[in-house]
Image (cartoon, rainbow, N blue to C red):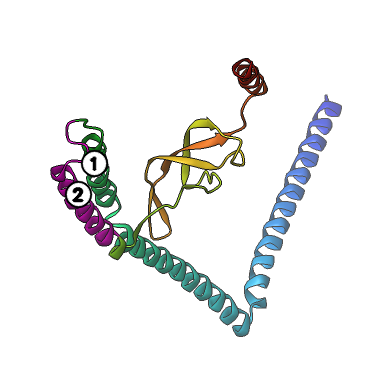
Amino acid sequence: MEKDQNKNINENLESNEIRENSEDIRDTNSKSDSEVENKDKVEKTPEEKILELEDKITRTFAEMENQRRRFEKEKEEAFEYGGFAFAKEALNLIDNLERSKKILEDDGELKDTPALLKILDHLNIINKDLISIFSKNHIKPIESLNKKLDPNFHQAMMEIEDDQKEPGTIVQEIQKGFTIKDRLLRPALVGVSKKIQKDEKKNEKNAENLENK
């Protein structure tokens, strides 16, 4: 019985010692952490604090400058290209004039008559006035004929067989294209040259031989 009591007493003592040691370790750790924090705070000199503050101010001003530049760029684009949509719609006037001229020129009854020539003169004057107004607003037609196909400004709608031109050369303008300043307003719709197929050349040669016989 006495042995059991002594055993219990010893176990209780050991348990108390373990708890005390654990608490001492925790206290030591918490003290060391707080000491490190206090040490960091103490280590920062006034010069270091000033440098940190200067760095924050520099970053803030840099961000403000970036925002100002973005705002200026957006403002300039709105001013320079604000009439982009209107200009694109206005191109329909030139298209309609071109179509009207084509219809009149193809009219067999009006062909070569004084009335037709007079109407065409008036349409040409209107067309030149429109181009002049566009030019003053930095809207210019894209030069196309006899130039190499440029995907940025021209859109090929068809290929036309032609051995007299280098393949990819623009030989027909279906619809005129325009730019506004350095921006594409509308691509030119064009036809480009391609080499005549060998079979077709052979057929043409055979046809010529038959004609000669």
Whether residue 75 is situated above or below residue 46 in the rendered picture: above
Q: List x then y, in percent, for residue 82.
A: 28, 57
| Residue lying furthest bottom | 47
Q: Which residue is mark 1?
A: 101
Question: What's the CA distance linking mark 2 and mark 1?
Answer: 7 Å
Q: Residue at x 52, y 31 (%)?
A: 159
Q: Please tell me which residue is depicted at 47% across the width and 43% down the height of the picture.
A: 154
**Picture quarter containing residue 11?**
top right
Q: Is residue 112 magenta?
A: yes
Say if 198 sits above or below 8 in the image. above
Give the magenta-colored segment's residue range. 109-134
Q: Nearer the viewer, residue 212 or 179?
A: 212
Residue 160, above or below 66 = above
Position of residue 67 in the picture relative to residue 201 (left or right): left
Q: Residue at x 40, y 64 (%)?
A: 73
Indicate left or right for 6 with 82 as reference.
right
Q: 166 left or right of 145?
A: right
Q: Residue furthest right?
A: 3
**Circle 2 residue:** 123
